[in-house]
Image (cartoon, rainbow, N blue to C red):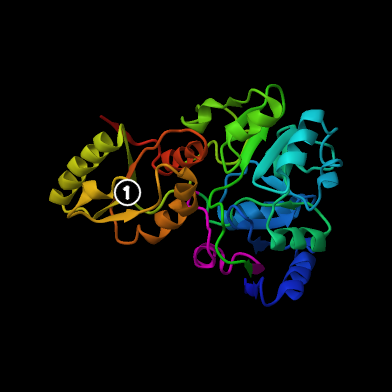
């Protein structure tokens, strides 16, 4: 497949207009959002949606998210719109919040992996919204990476995985949030299935108590169903081992230093994902600073890029755990899945 590349800044209308026609014709378009780049197809066309799974090598039992351009677009996709959803949409849409509710009959089972629910989001990114409007249909889209690899937050990451696999790629520059949207199920008690930029605390300020699914920080059980993208399989993983060290900053650093030295003696090439507060613990070792522990949003914004850019020629990445609070919950969700839940504790 010959992939056409458009720049969102210099080819605004031409790029989204053409890409919208590609979506309507059953093709695949990579587009930027505020979270990560998405690989989109016509969300009402089951055959087009199947092309997403083929391009990514994605298991067919992993549901997708439908992206819409205005709040009222959700009405035909759900059986009805509950009041709690309206409050959340008024507060957080457009933005990095995905809502799950009972699907209508027009949503194909290829989108939902056979579930009776569907996930819907209204992104905040101007180019994403322009593309959806140009397409005139909801766009089904997971992240635009090969299945299991770190999600793409920059054009070069997209090209690594999707050049030749999608009809169109729209370059919108770096993604600002850096991790996928928060996924909140509204079937039964409100439950976070995947954490993101909209935190549990932010949600509870609007609707009261919100649960966090056990699978957010733990592997999904062998016979459990994935109700949200990112729940069932190892995700976000580079082509090397990732090991997470838990404990206080000093204790985690001590674990990392010990295991780093052991790996070096075995002839392995390693790198440490450090924070601004802990970089002093790793003198004489190879490390990168990926953010500030006190501002976990900075860790989220750089994690996927670091997993791609700093893993070349590396046998092992060591990373510190941070408290799973606020945006730290999203960071730990992605980091644990990238590691396949390989955790060392003090």
> Who's the residue at 73% across and 45% down the image?
93
Q: Position of residue 228 (x, y in %)?
A: 62, 37
Q: Position of residue 233 (x, y in %)?
A: 50, 39
Q: For the magenta stretch, what is the residue range? A: 148-169
Return the residue nearer the eye: 44 or 172.
Answer: 172
The reply to whether residue 26 is in sight is no
Question: Residue at label 1?
Answer: 274
**What residue occupies the far left of the structure in this picture?**
265
Return the residue nearer the eye: 283 or 80.
Answer: 283
Above or below, comparing residue 118 to residue 11 in the picture: above
> Which quarter of the rendered picture does the N terminus lie within?
bottom right
Above or below, comparing residue 66 to residue 42 in the picture: above
> Who's the residue at 41% across and 54% down the image?
307
> Who's the residue at 68% across and 48% down the image?
95
Dot 1: within a 10 Å radius of its alpha carbon, few (fewer than 14), some, or many (20 or more) residues? many
Return the residue nearer the eye: 98 or 210.
Answer: 210
Does the magenta-highlighted stretch encompass residue 292? no
Does the magenta-highlighted stretch encompass residue 164? yes
SS category of the residue bearing label 1:
strand
> Which quarter of the rendered picture does the C terminus lie within?
top left
Q: Position of residue 187 (x, y in %)?
A: 72, 26
Above or below, comparing residue 246 to residue 126 in the picture: above
Lateral position of residue 116 relative to residue 144, left or right: right
The reply to whether residue 30 is in sight is yes
Lateral position of residue 305 relative to residue 48, left or right: left
Task: Examine the image and state in which quarter residue 226 appears.
Answer: top right
């Amino acid at each position: 497949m010959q992939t056409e590349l458009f720049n969102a800044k210099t080819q605004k209308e031409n790029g989204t207009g053409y890409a919208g026609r590609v979506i309507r014709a059953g093709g695949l378009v990579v587009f930027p959002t505020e979270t990560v780049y998405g690989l989109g197809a016509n969300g009402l066309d089951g055959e087009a949606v199947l092309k997403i799974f083929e391009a990514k090598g994605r298991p067919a039992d992993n549901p997708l998210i439908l992206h819409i351009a205005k709040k009222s677009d959700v009405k035909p996709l759900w059986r009805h719109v509950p009041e709690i959803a309206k409050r959340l949409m008024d507060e957080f849409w457009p933005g990095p919040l995905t809502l799950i509710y009972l699907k209508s009959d027009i949503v194909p089972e290829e989108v939902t992996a056979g579930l009776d629910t569907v996930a819907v989001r209204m992104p905040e990114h101007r180019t994403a919204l322009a593309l959806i409007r140009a397409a005139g249909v909801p766009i089904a889209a997971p992240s635009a990476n090969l299945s299991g690899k770190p999600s793409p937050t920059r054009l070069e990451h997209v090209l690594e995985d999707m050049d030749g696999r999608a009809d169109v790629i729209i370059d919108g520059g770096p993604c600002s949030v850096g991790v996928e949207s928060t996924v909140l199920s509204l079937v039964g008690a409100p439950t976070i299935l995947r954490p993101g930029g909209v935190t549990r605390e932010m949600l509870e300020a609007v609707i009261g108590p919100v649960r966090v699914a056990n699978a957010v920080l733990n592997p999904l059980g062998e016979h459990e169903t994935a109700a949200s993208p990112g729940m069932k399989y190892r995700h976000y993983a580079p082509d090397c081992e990732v090991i997470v060290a838990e404990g206080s900053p000093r204790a985690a650093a001590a674990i990392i230093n010990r295991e780093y030295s052991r790996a070096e003696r075995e002839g392995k090439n390693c790198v440490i994902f450090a924070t601004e507060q802990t970089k002093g613990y790793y003198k004489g070792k190879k490390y990168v600073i990926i953010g500030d522990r006190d501002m976990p949003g900075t860790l989220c914004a750089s994690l996927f890029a670091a997993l791609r850019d700093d893993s070349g020629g590396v046998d092992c990445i060591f990373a510190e755990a941070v408290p799973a609070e606020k945006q730290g919950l999203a960071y730990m969700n992605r980091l644990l899945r990238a590691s396949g839940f390989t955790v060392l504790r003090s």
